[in-house]
Amino acid sequence: MSSSKRHKRYEVSRQLGQVALGQSPAELVIKNGTLVNVFTGELQANMDVAVAAGRIAYIGNADHTIGEGTKVIDGKGRYITPGLLDGHMHVESTMLTVTEFAKAAIVSGTTGIYMDPHEIANVFGMEGVRWMHEEGQQLPLKVFTTIPSCVPATFDLEDGGAQLGVSDIEEGLTWPGTAGLGEVMNFPGVVNGDKAMLGEIEATLRAGKTVTGHFPAEDDRMLQAYLATGVSSDHETVTREQALEKVRLGMHLMIREGSAWQDIKEVIKVVTEDKVRTDNMSLITDDVYPQTLVRLGHMNHIVRRAMEEGVDPVTAIQMGTINVARYFGMELDLGSISPGKSADILLIDDLKRMVPSVVIADGEVVAENGRLVVEFPSYQYPEKAYQSVRLARALTPEDFLLRSKSGSAARTEVNVVRVIENSARTAKMTAVLPVEGGIIRPDLEQDVVQLACIERHRGTGQISLGFASGFGLKSGAVASTVAHDSHNLLVMGTNVDDMAFAANELAACGGGMIVVRDGKVLAKVAMPIAGLLADRPVEVVAEEVAALEDAWKELGCFINAPFMTFSLIALPVIPEIRITNRGIADVIEFKLIETEVGPVQ
C-alpha cells in the first residue's frame, strides 16, 4: 500500500473500533503466534492479531473478528514482531534507486526508513531530493526523508553541483513525509554560531520535527553546546565511553552497523556491560552496499548483530522498532503491534536468525519466504537526472601530467593522501618522487600512485592533480563519480593513459565506478542517475559490485571495500588531507596546499 492509499488513524478509527468489538470483520487475522511486545519486553504466547484498513484493530483471541472474507494466517510456531525501522541511512550508498532498494529491504523485514539523500542533493540540490522523496512516497516501504543540512559540506575547499540554504530546508520540511533535518555534519559551525546552520536547526524545531546529528569529536563542551542548539542524536559514536557520555546527556544514540563502518561490537558494550537503559538508543545502517543487502539482509542483519554481541532479542528488536518511531515522534503510528497502529508486521520462525517468513506492510502481505508477492510501482527519473557528468571535453593523458616547479631537479618532495583501511580518515604524508622530463612520476615501490579530481557538474574543465598511497595498486587505473560529498570525478592510477581512458569511459556511461588496465575495462558499475544510482535490480548491481571489487584486487589492491575508501578521498571535512577539484586540501588547517613541496638534492 503506497502512502497515497494509506489511511490516517482518524479516518478509520470507527471501523477499527467496530472490528475490535466483533461488529465488523477483520480483513486479516494472524492466529496463535508468539507476540514480541516491545512495550513490556514480554514474549506472549498464543496471540492473535486482527487487521483492518491497514491498521491493527485487536490483539488477543481474535476469533470474534473473523468473517467470511477474512484472510487467516497461521502463526503457530512463529514470532509476531513489528516491522523494522532504519532511523538513518543514505539510499545512494546502496547504489540503487529507492524502488530497487525498497524491494531488497522489505523482503528482509524493513518496513520503514528515514533517509538522508544528501548525496543527490550535492549534485542536483532540492530537485534531486524531491525526486527520491517522491519515488519513496509511492512504495509499500514507508520512506521518510530528512532534508540534507550540509550541502555543500564546505564552501571553501570544493565545488559541488548545488547549495542548500535555510529557505530550501523550510520548503522541504513542508512536504508530506519529511521527518526532520538530515545529519548536521558541520558541528563546528553549529557550536561557533554559524548563521546558516543555526537557521536550519531553528527552522526544523519551529516545524516540530527532529534534528539528527553527526558528532565524531570528543570535546565535552562542544558536545553539550551542540546538544543545546537542538541537535538530538548521533551515529558517529565508536567507543563505549563516548556512548555512555552521550546517553547520560539525553542524546539519542544511533549505533551504526553498515557495510564498511561496523560499530556494534564496541559501542553495544554500553548495553551489555554498563547495563544502561536502551529507551533512547536505536540501531541504524548509515551506508550499506548491495552485496550486503543480498547476502545478509538489511535491518534484520543489524538486529541480529546486536543479539550476537549479547543483547536480549526483544531489546534488540525494540532498538530497531519502537525506539526509532519514538525518536521521530511517530510512535502513535509506527514501531509496535498495538491497536490503531499501522499494520507493519513480521512473522519470524527463529528470533535469533531474524529472517521473516512473512512481511506485512499496511495490512497487506508483501513478501513471503524471501520473495515479493506484490507489484512495485515504477518511477521514471527525468532526462536531466541522466545528464550529470558534464566535462569540458574528452580527457587526454596529458591532462594527468603534473609538471614540477623544481627546474632541473631529478627528485622532488610531494604531499600525499594516505588512506587508512576501514576508516573514513586519511593521513597526511610526504614522499620523494622522480622527475622525468619535468613531469613528477608515481613510484609503485613506495605505493604512491597518481590522483586526480575533475569538476563534473558545470563543465569548467577544472582538474586538480595529486598523489595517493595505501591502495597497493600495481597497474591500471580506477575512476568514480561517487566522491563524497561533492561527487566530482575522481581518477587514480599507475599511468596517465589508463587514467584518461577510465575517466572518459565513465563519463560516457553517465557516471559510476570503473576499473581499467591497458586500455580495457575490467569491471564497471554504471550509475547514470546523478552519477550515483544504478537503474538496474539489486541482484544485478550486487554482482557488478562484486566484480568491481575483484578487479581492484587484480590491480594489486589489498584493502577491504576499496571503492568506498576511494569515494571518501575527496571529503574535505574529515582529517587530515584530501583532494578536491580545487586542489589538495589540508583539513587540519582547513586550507588548500600545493601538491609539490619542493626539490630534493
Image (cartoon, rainbow, N blue to C red):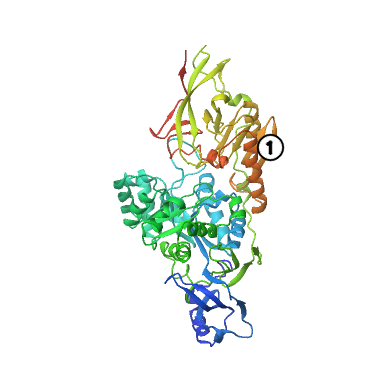
Q: Nearer the viewer, residue 414 or 550?
A: 550
For residue 492, what is the image quadrant? top right
The residue lying at 52 percent from left, 18 percent from top is 404
Q: Residues within 10 Å of mark 1 (few under 14, many from 20)?
A: some
Pointer 1: what residue? 522
What element does badge 1 sit on? strand
Quarter where residue 442 is shown: top right
Q: Quadrant of the N terminus?
A: bottom right
Side of 489 relative to 584 (left or right): right
Quadrant housing residue 73: bottom right
Q: How far across and how far down the image is residue 68, in percent?
A: 64, 85
Say which amino acid is labelled 1.
Leu
Write the residue at 49% across / 83% down: 17
Name the residue nearer the viewer: 386 or 502. Answer: 502
Residue 188 visible from this viewpoint: yes
Q: Position of residue 297 (x, y in %)?
A: 58, 57
